[in-house]
Amino acid sequence: MTIQTRRERERAERERLIVTAARELAEAEGWDAVTTRRLAAEIEYSQPVLYSHFKGKDAIMAAVAVQGFADLAAELRAARTAADGTRETLAEVARTYTSFARRRPALYDAMFTHLVNLPFATEEAPAPLREAFGELLLAVQPIAADGDDPGLLTETFWAGLHGLTTLMRSGRLPKEGHESRLALLIAHFTGD
């Protein structure tokens, strides 16, 4: 192994350490608790080391968001491939999406609520963002009628899931009706 290869591996490991620490701290205490000073103390590196990897908290949050999209894509894929039938697939993907948001609120916020410098809905979007959307698209595509744009249909389904999730998390919709709301959304999309 060359010295350059070792340095690159060590740099990548430090970046993973920073992102993991930020994610864990945000999940435990919220994003306001995530500061470069606090992260430096958590990972036992100086603040200049953090800044040599990331421009600041926003860049760290964007890296956490990309990691979150990879996690979401994997969970959606597992749900989609385990389900039988179009309606069941859509329902499982919907449950998985909303469950992800409930179980990982700070991660979901980094992905969808906080302003992060990530391109969405373009070819420049990081692969994990495209993969997560792709899993939603694969679940929605079978219900598209002739002439429907599957991408727009998927965006609308995603917007419905995000809206239900956000309203429930903020207490504007009671948790008790969550499954019924998902069932209504699925019925609307499948025409049942």
Image: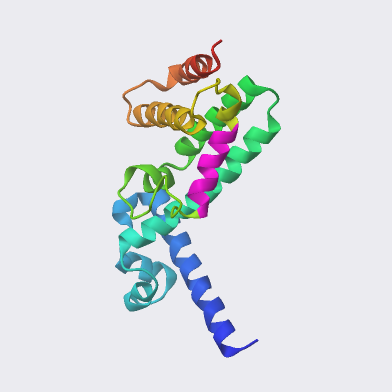
Percent across and percent down for residue 126 are: 47, 55
Residue at image position (45%, 17%) is 181
> Which quadrant is the C terminus positioned in?
top right
Percent across and percent down for residue 16 are: 50, 66
The front one of 29 and 116 is: 116
In the image, residue 126 sits, relative to residue 176, either above or below, namely below
In the image, residue 22 sits, relative to residue 173, either above or below, namely below
Residue at image position (70%, 33%) is 82
In the image, residue 164 sits, relative to residue 138, either above or below, namely above
Residue furthest top as drawn: 192
The front one of 61 and 2 is: 2
Residue at image position (65%, 86%) is 1
Residue furthest bottom as drawn: 3
The front one of 28 and 165 is: 165
Percent across and percent down for residue 142 are: 61, 25
Residue furthest front as drawn: 147
Task: Tell me: 1 left or right of 148.
Answer: right
Q: Main secondary structure of the magenta part?
A: helix
Percent across and percent down for residue 175 are: 42, 22
Does residue 44 belong to the magenta stretch?
A: no
Identify the magenta region: 127-138
Task: Tell me: 1 left or right of 100.
Answer: right
